[in-house]
Image: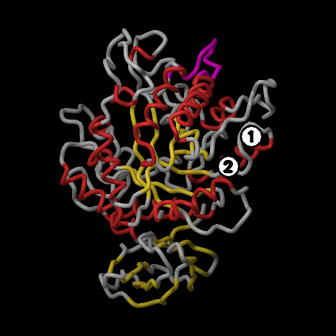
Amino acid sequence: MRRLLLLLPLVVALALPAGAAARPGMHTIFQAPRELRGEDSALRSRTLDEIHDLGADWLRVVLYWRDVAPAADSRTRPSFPERDPNAYNWAVYDRMMREAHDKGLHLLVSISGPVPRWATRSKRDQVTRPSAKRYGRFTEAVARHFGGLVDAYSIWNEPNHPDFLKPQWTGRHHHRPTSAKLYRRLFIRGARGLAAGGAGSTPVLMGETASRGTSQVVGPTTFLRVASCLNKHWHKKHRSCHRLPADGYAHHAYTSRGGPYYKPPKHGDITIRVLHRLNHVLAKAGRAGAIRRGMRIWLTEFGIQSWPDRVFGVKQRTQAEWRAIGEHMAYANKRVVMFSQYLMRDDDPVAGAATRMQRYSGFQTGLRGARGGRKKSYAAFRLPLVALKHGHRVKLWGMVRPARRRTTVTIEFKARGSRRWHVLKRKRTNAYGAWRSSTSRIKGRRYRVRWKAPSGHWYRGPATRVHHRT
């Protein structure tokens, strides 16, 4: 019952029209596949405790169809009851999801490709034209197996990216966004399968879109419009375009090395800086009757790339500051109910890589380095702090992520060239741990936050510079 009561405010928020109430709070969702998918049970337990202690309340798990299906590499479909959960091997997902549930974390499960080879039209690979009918049977098995363990589902991971769904574009000059049409069928069948498996009252998200389009990737705005069966004027293409039964829209609002204030020139791209574009197109799709009006946004993947990736990454201090600014942008958007951290630990460098770009071709967005050492972002994640120049003032915003009720933070400053920190003020948070304040702008000052947990332990965030809004 307690779990249901904790989840209720978020479920209610999903159903509210945008702007129906002032922003009360924002949930935090974490993704740590490297630690949680492995065989090391002690590492899994330690990581789940760490995620909870850092203040995250949700865990995202991407469940790959091919991981659990029988004979996934075969071109010939084995004879088995596709709706029967006993026909699949859930071992990897069972242990991490049940342990996360036992630790008190809510679960968002993204049911995604790559898929079994036999579930595609051509049988050549595991991402091209997957069968929506078979996908619906699979999602029914997922719902039957995991039952009440899962708090929300989403359909596919980055379906506008060719690593997960092909073809992205077809036609002469690659002008037709075919992946969006494939996705619409996958979503309808997938949601229907979840309902048939007993998860009809569990929220189902659409999207999980990558932030930027290319010649290989369909941009998120175009993808959303076509998946919603709308023409270029955002009107329904034909009468058979029924409303998609989605409860929220999931998006991965990654930015570039230009930082959180980077504004992509393509209007169809949606990074954290231009998240209002997603508000705008969701509103248009809602008015057209293609999706629920006032649909909420779940930012289910986000992170800032850091050194040792010197091509796309930034210094650790900058990573911590930029991540906090991105979170502040999300918090200011009333449609957003969820913000993410991806990953706990950086991906390992590629051994024997010929170039630095190839060596760090994975993600260096973790709170820990590849060897496990804590970055500056680790402390900053628990106590994110933003200091923004505003005329002759500095506006401060922050959060005590582990707070479950109102608490008090101590804001400190340090003058340029000094080693000594001074108390600026103490500030009460709201019920969700967020707070805001302002102070006179004095050149060269740095700021940080200290917080005393109910256990009596003091936590301290890293020094934060003043940034300019751009």
What separation in Å lies between label 1 and label 2 (alpha carbons)? 10 Å
Residue at 48% across, 72% down? 399
Q: Residues within 10 Å of mark 2 (few under 14, many from 20)?
A: many
The span shown in magenta is 166-178
Which amino acid, by three-letter code, is at mark 1? Ala
In the displayed structure, would residue 323 be above or below residue 225? below
Residue 347 position in % (x across, y down): 28, 44
For numbered disc 2, what is the local secondary structure? loop
Which amino acid, by three-letter code, is at mark 2? Met
Which mark lies nearer to you, 1 or 2?
A: 2
Going by the image, does 377 lie left or right of 404? left
In the displayed structure, would residue 9 be above or below residue 448? above
- The residue that disc 1 covers is 285
- Chief secondary structure of the magenta span? loop
Q: Tell me whether the residue at label 1 lies in contact with that at label 2, contact meaning CB atoms closer than 8 angstroms.
A: yes
Residue 388 position in % (x across, y down): 55, 71
Q: Residue 174: within the magenta? A: yes
Q: Which of 380 and 439 lies nearest the eye of the viewer? A: 380
Residue 341 seen from this side: no
Residue at 36% across, 66% down? 54
Residue 386 position in % (x across, y down): 50, 70
Residue 297 position in % (x across, y down): 60, 51
- The residue that disc 2 covers is 295
- The quarter of the picture where residue 224 lies is top right
In the displayed structure, would residue 408 be above or below residue 284? below
Residue at 37% across, 13% down? 79
